Amino acid sequence: MSAIIDQTVETYGIENWGAGYFGVNRKGNLVVRPTDNDSLSADVREIIEDLRKRGINPPILLRFPQLLVGQIRKLQTAFRKSIKEFDYDGRHLCVFPMKVNQNRAVVEEYLREASRYDFGLEAGSKAELYAALSMEQTGESLLVINGFKDRDFVRLAFTGARAGKNVVIVVEKLSELDHTLNFTDEVLKENPKAKLPMIGVRVKLYSKGSGRWEKSGGEAAKFGLTTTEILEVIRRLAVAGRTEMLKLLHFHIGSQLTDIKRIKNAMKEAARTYAKIRQMNIPIQYLDVGGGMAVDYDGSRTSFESSANYNAREFANDVIYVIKTVCDDENVPHPDIIQESGRYLSAYHAILITNVQDEIETVVEDITPMKVDEDDPQVVKELYDLRESINGKNYREYYHDALEHREELFQMFNLGLISLEDRGKGEVLFWDVCERADGYAQQKKYVSEEFDELRKLLSTKYLANFSVFRSMPDNWALEQLFPIIPVHRLNKKPNEFATLCDITCDSDGIVEKFVDLHDVKPVLELHKLESDEPYYLAMLLVGAYQEVMGNNHNLFGVPHEAHVHVGDDGYIIKKVIHGATLGDTLAGVRFDRTQMHEQFRKIVQRRIKDGELSEKEGHELIEYYESEINAYTYLTPNGH
Ligand SMILES: *Cc1c(COP(=O)(O)O)cnc(C)c1O
């Protein structure tokens, strides 16, 4: 590999956050590697070119189901090893929380691999449960149901159980228990041998997680039963003679748990609670430790919000060790451990590809070559002198002088003392001084804060063909970081510093925080745009939550999607799903296509009647308007 490629790999931190799945090939293109086996890899640039030939233009969501499988295996292996190492008696079973990504392709691919380990599903709403009930699961796997439940939701859960699923209704509120007991009586009256759902209880732990979702845990959490409520559940079950239905104890202290210490504390508390209930002769079999395993988006391995200070193996070791120790101490059997990790399994498999459409200038550039002459105002001449004589020793002082002169320039303009041309000249010279000062500042070992700010101000804005709101909502809503890198030209040093703007007309539609090993970068190193070549960017690790939380701001709907398999002979595009058309997104806000077409036709016909348009022109307009209903909502080259 060339030294430059090594350098760009480091610049973007690919090896820090890539979990081994991503790399750069000799051509300088981004590659995806589905396994640790280096020989299998897919060139992302080639995939895009291939798709473009089929009329599929960016933005495109590339799905690599093999990366989902890779994560399932990593997690399963980690727990299998820990269980062996600590001589743990129970099993480790995952249930995939559908809310992370309910996309059918994702759930199906998950289940295909999951069936090898008896992993199941978790549903948090009626819709998710409904979908889950249509999927094949193995006989040992669970279907865990969380979230607030009404009578219909509980009834749907019973339907699933009677259809043979190992359904667990996790009681979040006492009313859910009453519905469950009532249905139990009803069902058993009809068939005393009917398969029933199991009951779980969600406990409200005192322990909290860390990071952005800290408030999901602790006393003030939205979900979970307090100690007295759990005792009440047990009492009511005893009265009904159904204590044997209580099979699972659940807790979930939040998503993206960044700090392993907090996780351990929660495990201790939950394990102790399990043990005490078990000692009351209640045959709880499962301890559900919830989700929350974090993804190291920035690769820093710290407890920073977009990172995690542990890996799968450490996580598994701590869970198994803590639960075993507490259970042995309390003399109760080791429970089967249920894990609801979604983010960890799903984040890696999806990549959003966008193209940089253009550049938005922030600094004022010289459009016509400029000369400064005798008649120019003093302030312009002084800025000119600064520009000509700035150097590595005086740049700080000269930069400060330029700031003052700019202030003066505007004051004089406002007083009517200088012309529009003078003002223009002054601005160009000011930004020239800034650029030169920035150049000198960045050569120094320590760059002071004011020059960091200046760099951000001078950075280029690249207009990227996507919607932050649609495809990276957590970046907008939560300042969650996602790795972003060019798909190609990685064998060339990126010399531009840029931030990204999306194509929504919202000034919040920007990305100006980027992953960095030690900090958060305010600008991203990118290549200069070439007029004759597209520039593609990849936004990675967007497979968890982003797709389903994304919204329709400005009516940019879902992007095109392609499912890619990586095999011995390179990649295979298994499936292409077209993104939203104008008609699709408009239907979402209740605009009916027939009605729009009729109304437009009427408007045009009136113009024809008034003699403002010929018949022919009118028909062309109508025809074009009607055909555009099927256009892609994003920017496309040459009107495709
Ligand atoms: C959201 C959620 C999960 C998934 O959390 P991740 O951080 O994606 O692993 C699991 N369980 C419950 C109850 C949840 O609400």
Image (cartoon, grey):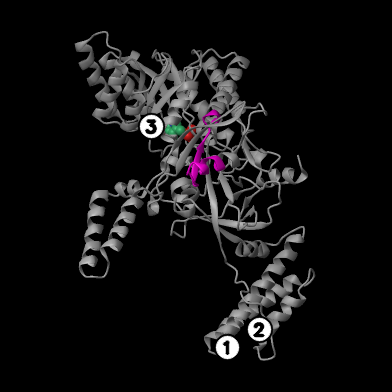
Judge: label 3 CB < 8 Å from ligand 1: no
Task: Please report contact status of discs 2 and 1: CB closer than 8 Å, yes or no.
Answer: yes
The answer to whether residue 72 is magenta is no
Q: Which residues are magenta?
A: 48-67
Q: Identity of the amino acid at label 2? A: Val
Q: Nearer the viewer, mark 3 or mark 1?
A: 1
Distance from disc 2 to disc 1, alpha carbons, whole Å, reads 10 Å
Label 3: which residue? 224
Camera-side residue of 224 and 370? 370
Give the class, few, some or many, for how many residues have Cα within 10 Å of label 2's Cα (few <14, many ≥20). many
- Residue 466 higher or lower than 362, as above or below: above
Residue 80: give x, y in percent of width and height.
Answer: 58, 18
Q: Nearer the viewer, mark 3 or mark 2?
A: 2
Which of disc 1 and disc 3 is earlier in sequence? 3
- Classify mark 2: helix, strand or loop: helix
Which residue does the image show at 45% across and 23% down from the upper left? 111
- Residue 228 higher or lower than 557, as above or below: above
Q: Which mark is residue 388?
A: none
Q: Identity of the amino acid at label 3? A: Gly
Task: Please report contact status of discs 3 and 2: CB closer than 8 Å, yes or no.
Answer: no
- Classify mark 1: helix, strand or loop: loop
Q: Is residue 97 in view from this perspective?
A: no
Distance from disc 3 to disc 2, alpha carbons, whole Å, reads 68 Å
Which of disc 1 and disc 2 is earlier in sequence? 2
Judge: label 1 CB < 8 Å from ligand 1: no
Which residue does the image show at 28% across and 28% down from the upper left? 153
Find residue 142 and report its image quarter.
top left
Residue 282: give x, y in percent of width and height.
Answer: 38, 14
Label 1: which residue? 418
Label 2: which residue? 380
In the displayed structure image, the side of residue 238 where residue 416 appears, left or right: right
